[in-house]
Amino acid sequence: MNPREIHTLLKERFGEAVRDWTEPEVGDSSLDLDSGSLHDVCVLLRDDSALRFDFLRLVSAVDRTDRIECVYHLWSYELAHSAALRVELDRSDPRVASLSDVWPTAEWHEREAYDMMGVVFENHPHLHRILLPEDWEGYPLRKDYVAPREYNGLTNE
Amino acid sequence: MGTEILKTPAPTAEELLGRAVQDPRDLTRYLYYLRNVRAEGLSVAVAPLDAAINWSRASSIWPLTFGIACCAIEMMATGAAKYDLDRFGAGAFRPTPRQADLMIVAGTVTHKMAPRVRRLYDQMPEPKFVMAMGACTIGGGPYSRLGYHVVKGIDRFLPVDVCVPGCPPRPEALIDALMYLQRKIAADRPVTDRYLRPFFSKEKRR
Ligand code: SF4
């Protein structure tokens, strides 16, 4: 299936929760979703016999300065097609449902997104920092991040 | 014995030792030194012990096995057959800090890593040496300006003996640093003070 067909299929099932199709200027097209419906959509994407997305390639977060986007790249080994999902989150309190019960691989990816961007994944089994030390302050990949002048007695200048 | 020495002004024992330890791998120099010292009647029986200890130390610098980032690849290449660190007696990478003499810090040290590196260093027995390999360990390297997570130079928490510049340094550079370290060790005096008296004599220490 190409992304256009997947979009039509999802639109039938979920209606308004799936945003209208936009043709991308460059690169792959993504399916924009309401953040509230993400988990249900993903369960369908995994289980539907025409979709069969059995592999979550990547979870990433993007800081657009007025909002934070979470992007999910999916791949189906069985049917050899791919899709990208995108949800927009409130920058002051980014929250979205965790997908670690749909695809277990999401667990570490979501921890990284939490570590670097501060996206909180609800119902995540173990949402802690994965790369930085536990007591680090701030989320370094946000555009307005200011590096600490000192950490653990070592200056950073 | 000693007739040819008497023609020229007799070198002091310290000079002789200096000459002898130029190249720690040359045992015959030590024997020559020992003979000259005895010909002069100097009471420095333990001074050659310095040289012998230095020689054995400098020719068996065992590094600690660990690599943190990309520089470690070059360190592994140095240890492997082509560059063969074993020629200098330094190819025995020890898997435990308690058997290691040299810590080659090969790679970016992050703030999270720094306490771990320091702990490994603390576990090594004296005498121990630290080599800062690569731009990252010397001053943060590519991360020196915008790397929020990188310690800008490991000399902020470790005493560094040799710095090896490069990103990454070639194996030749690492070998050069190792030979520098050997010279540094050879200049050490583990059992005598600056008058070449043994530490265990009753006279004043250094
Ligand atoms: S100095 Fe260069 S090669 Fe070495 S660890 Fe740093 S970035 Fe990697």
Image: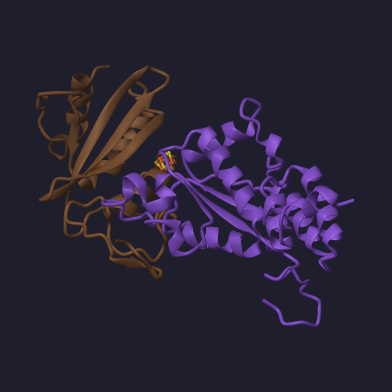
Q: How is the image coloured?
A: by chain
Left or right, A78 with reference to B124: left
Specify the quarter for ligand 1.
top left
Q: Residue B119: where, in percent of width, then height?
A: 58, 63
Of all chains in the rendering, the one displayed in purple is: B
For the point 61% across and 65% down, the residue is: B122
Regarding residue B123, the answer to whether it shows in the image is yes
Q: Residue A149: where, in percent of width, then height?
A: 28, 66
Q: Residue B52: where, in percent of width, then height?
A: 79, 54
Left or right, B170 with reference to B195: left
Quadrant including the C terminus of chain B: bottom right
Judged from this view, the residue extending furthest toward the right is B1
For the point 90% across and 51% down, the residue is: B1
Judged from this view, the residue extending furthest toward the front is B7
Q: Tell how many labels.
A: 0
Q: Colour of chain A?
A: brown
For the point 38% across and 30% down, the residue is: A47
Q: Residue A63: where, in percent of width, then height?
A: 18, 47
Give the answer, above or below, for where B179 lies relative to B50. above
Give the answer, above or below, for where A153 lies relative to A121. below
Query: A31 or A113, which lies in front?
Result: A113
Regarding residue B73, the answer to whether it shows in the image is no
